[in-house]
Amino acid sequence: MFKFWNAYFSLFFTWLLMVSIALVTKINFFLVASLFYTGVLPFICMVLFFSRSILGEKIRKHVKKWHFTVYVSWIIFVYSIYAQKWAAETLNSIFKVDASYLNITYKLLAFLFAPFGLFYNVFILSWINLMFVFIGFIVVTILSFFLLINAPLKSFGKFSLFFFMFFIFVSFASPLLSKLAIHKSELIKEFALWADFSEENLCTDSWASSTRSVLFLNGKFVLAYHPYASDGYQFSVESCNYKKKF
């Protein structure tokens, strides 16, 4: 049991460290790495739960039953549909182009749908914070009751230690998740610029001199990224004159 919770602690400590470094340094590599790790963390915890917990072991015994397999297949099917829909809408809201042009980013977002589309959003996180305040009030009341009835020090110490560790984790994790949810579009943009945009092109137009990278669209059109333009004007669809020689 200790090894089981120790594995969870290692995962979440790594997550806290990665996200903290990413938000402090603003380095693209750490931003992308923290975005990816945050997305896959629930899946890792799910695998850990089914592989090591007692309840997970009991569930695994029913996996071979045909009805269980059918239910899981339908869940995966529905998840994949909503994941692709959410990823397409998110990319379209940021870049105003068809998500199919951002092939790598689209696949990543479709995979990360559950964390960022369902859990890591401001509305749900705000409710989690309210629930945490309520639970904290209840736990403090219980701890006070333990002191009044002179509960055994060993039981009281274990309960206090668990609550203290849980409180510290939520105190750190909740603000970081809120920042990720608020700056989600910026993180996606940085990843797309790294994964799907190209810094090399054959465009000889006047706008090309102020462009860092482009995303190739249909025909002669490209989505140009202007890093020094003001917010709201950094992306523009341009017609590319392919006359550059190399």
Image (spheres, rainbow, N blue to C red):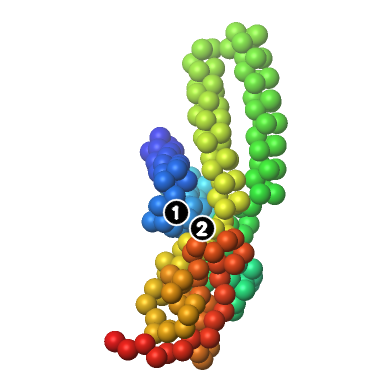
Q: Residue at x 57, y 46 (%)?
A: 179
In space, the residues marked 2 and 1 are separated at their CA atoms by 7 Å
- State yes or no: discs 2 and 1 in contact (Cβ < 8 Å): yes
Residue at 60% x, 46% y is: 178
> What is the number of the mark on residue 8?
none
Q: Residue at x 41, y 46 (%)?
A: 25
* Residue holding disc 1: 31
Q: Position of residue 41 (x, y in %)?
A: 47, 52
In the picture of the structure, the residue carrying the numbered disc 2 is 187
Query: For numbered disc 2, what is the local secondary structure?
Result: helix
Mark 1 belongs to which amino acid?
Answer: Leu
Q: Position of residue 228 (x, y in %)?
A: 50, 62
Q: Is 30 placed above or below 189 here?
A: above
Where is 91 relative to 148, above or below? below
- How packed mark 2 is, by other alpha carbons closer than 10 Å (few <14, some 14-19, many 20 or more), is some
Identified at 63% across, 57% down, the residue is: 118
Percent position (x, y) of residue 29?
38, 56
As shown in the figure, which amino acid type bears the numbered disc 2? Leu
